[in-house]
């Protein structure tokens, strides 16, 4: 089950930041690998969220 | 038996008549043309309602007026008759609504002019909504096709939203107060934080949509703390409520489209991101490897240079050293002369007949001093 508290917008922005850093080529190789691993984890989480979550409707009276 | 009417005073007469009205008459919906409209002391509203043959006086309060009124408009009034103890007979207003496209459009135009002056519809007042939002407050009639359309498109496009719905009437007398209460509830009463409020309603006649041109709703949307998305009716006639919203969608389905991206597009983007990331890391690794190679090359060049320098320095010293080697001097034809194992540098140190030893580059000879 995907994390219902996942903040898509925030994580998506984080992923963009990682891509920008990697694209710039200005990070050390150690950091590149850490960023790569982090980016892959975010992509997997976001994919899971998009595929598995549901819209929740609640009537307020 | 003779019937003798009981004498009553004037106040009793007023009460009697009003009681009779209440008991027998109830409340009526009456439609007619507005005439002699005036507001007194910013509080009381007086006007006549007329048709070709009759004119009747009405009395109400400014709080019952939700749209601009001017003589000639066609209106419908929920009211009851009342005899005032000083000012005579009039119909007491409970609620007023506009009738017919002409009156509705005229009232909307007048209200728009008024609110325009206050800057209620200015583009710079429009706020952005998080894309995609996480929590939505939805105000609509849950029985409507508009609601079904909105939910269908939303579910089709994106998952993971929290949508709290307040079910309201979207036309008729109760619509205005229910919608305004719902906006207030989402903004103030509920502890939740909403990314946006969405108000939707399907198409209808100008009268069906009239609530969304009422001042109280327009102001409530314009001052909502939470950003608003509105889709009311069709694209052709834009209500003032829509103009006051942060985002105005053409239809309820369009509202869903504007609110969230399509999951399939996002999944595609994520795939692209993964490919890009692999590519960037690969490039980084290649660049890093090349850099290492360069470093290695530089290092060996540096080492070679140092070695060469040391070698040439050494050669230089060797040459100097060899210049001082007596053997090397002898090789150039010089000789070392000694007498009694003492090297002779001055002829005064020798006498005639002294035996001397002469060391050559190669070999040694003995000789005798013959003269000086």
Image: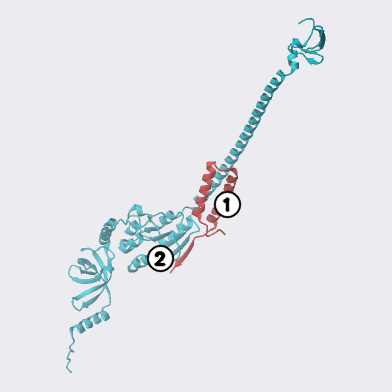
Chain colours: A red, B cyan
Label 1's element?
helix
Q: Quadrant of residue B353?
A: top right
Quadrant containing the N terminus of chain B is bottom left
Label pair 1/2, CB-CB below 8 angstroms: no
Q: Which mark is residue A41?
A: 1
Quadrant containing the C terminus of chain B is top right
Q: Nearer the viewer, mark 1 or mark 2?
A: 2
Question: According to the image, label 2 marks what residue?
Answer: B188
Q: Label 1: chain?
A: A
Q: Quadrant of residue B256?
A: bottom left
Residue in the foreground of this view, choosing between B178 and B342: B342
| Residue ranking furthest to the top | B371
Marks 1 and 2 belong to one chain: no
Q: Is residue B323 above or below residue B206?
A: above
Q: Is residue B345 above or below residue B61?
A: above
Image location of residue A30, percent across then percent down: 60, 45
Which class describes the residues within 10 Å of circle 2: few (<14), some (14-19), or many (20+)? some
Q: Label 2: chain?
A: B
Residue in the foreground of this view, choosing between B142 and B269: B269
Which class describes the residues within 10 Å of circle 1: few (<14), some (14-19), or many (20+)? few
Q: Which mark is residue B251?
A: none
Residue B214 appears in the rendering: no
Image location of residue B127, percent across then percent down: 39, 55
The span from disc 1 to disc 2 (Cα, nearest Å) is: 38 Å
| Residue ranking furthest to the bottom | B1
């Amino acid at each position: 089950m995907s994390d219902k508290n996942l903040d898509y917008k925030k994580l998506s922005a984080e992923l963009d930041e990682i891509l920008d850093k990697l694209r710039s080529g200005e990070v050390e190789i150690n950091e590149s690998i850490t960023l790569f691993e982090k980016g892959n984890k975010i992509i997997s989480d976001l994919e899971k969220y998009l595929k598995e979550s549901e819209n929740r409707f609640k009537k307020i009276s | 038996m003779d019937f003798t009417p009981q004498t009553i005073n004037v106040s009793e007469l007023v009460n009697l008549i009003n009681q009779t009205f209440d008991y027998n008459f109830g409340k009526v919906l009456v439609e007619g043309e507005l005439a002699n409209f005036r507001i007194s002391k910013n509080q009381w509203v007086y006007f006549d309602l007329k048709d070709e043959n009759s004119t009747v006086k009405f009395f109400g309060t400014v709080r019952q007026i939700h749209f601009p009124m001017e003589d000639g408009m066609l209106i419908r009034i929920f009211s009851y008759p009342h005899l005032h103890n000083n000012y005579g007979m009039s119909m007491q207003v409970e609620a007023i609504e506009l009738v017919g496209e002409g009156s509705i459009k005229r009232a909307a135009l007048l209200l728009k002019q008024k609110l325009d002056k206050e800057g209620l519809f200015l583009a710079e007042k429009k706020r952005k909504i998080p894309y995609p939002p996480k929590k939505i407050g939805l105000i609509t009639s849950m029985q409507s096709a508009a609601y079904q359309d909105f939910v269908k498109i939303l579910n089709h496009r994106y998952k993971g939203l929290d949508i709290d719905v307040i079910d309201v009437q979207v036309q008729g007398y109760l619509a205005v107060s229910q919608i305004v209460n719902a906006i207030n509830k989402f903004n103030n009463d509920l502890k939740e934080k909403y990314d946006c409020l969405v108000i939707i309603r399907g198409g209808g006649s100008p009268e069906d949509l009239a609530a969304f041109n009422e001042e109280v709703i327009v102001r409530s949307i314009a001052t909502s703390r939470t950003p608003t998305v509105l889709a009311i009716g069709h694209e052709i006639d834009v209500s003032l409520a829509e103009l006051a919203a942060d985002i105005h969608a053409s239809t309820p389905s369009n509202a869903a489209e504007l609110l969230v991206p399509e999951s399939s597009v996002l999944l595609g983007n994520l795939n692209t991101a993964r490919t890009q990331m692999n590519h960037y890391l690969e490039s980084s690794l290649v660049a890093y490897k090349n850099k290492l190679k360069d470093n290695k090359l530089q290092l060996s060049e540096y080492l070679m240079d140092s070695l060469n320098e040391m070698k040439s320095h050494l050669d230089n010293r060797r040459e100097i050293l060899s210049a001082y080697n007596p053997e090397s001097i002898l090789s150039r034809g010089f000789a070392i002369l000694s007498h009694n194992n003492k090297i002779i540098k001055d002829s005064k140190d020798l006498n005639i007949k002294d035996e001397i030893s002469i060391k050559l580059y190669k070999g040694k000879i003995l000789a005798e001093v013959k003269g000086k």
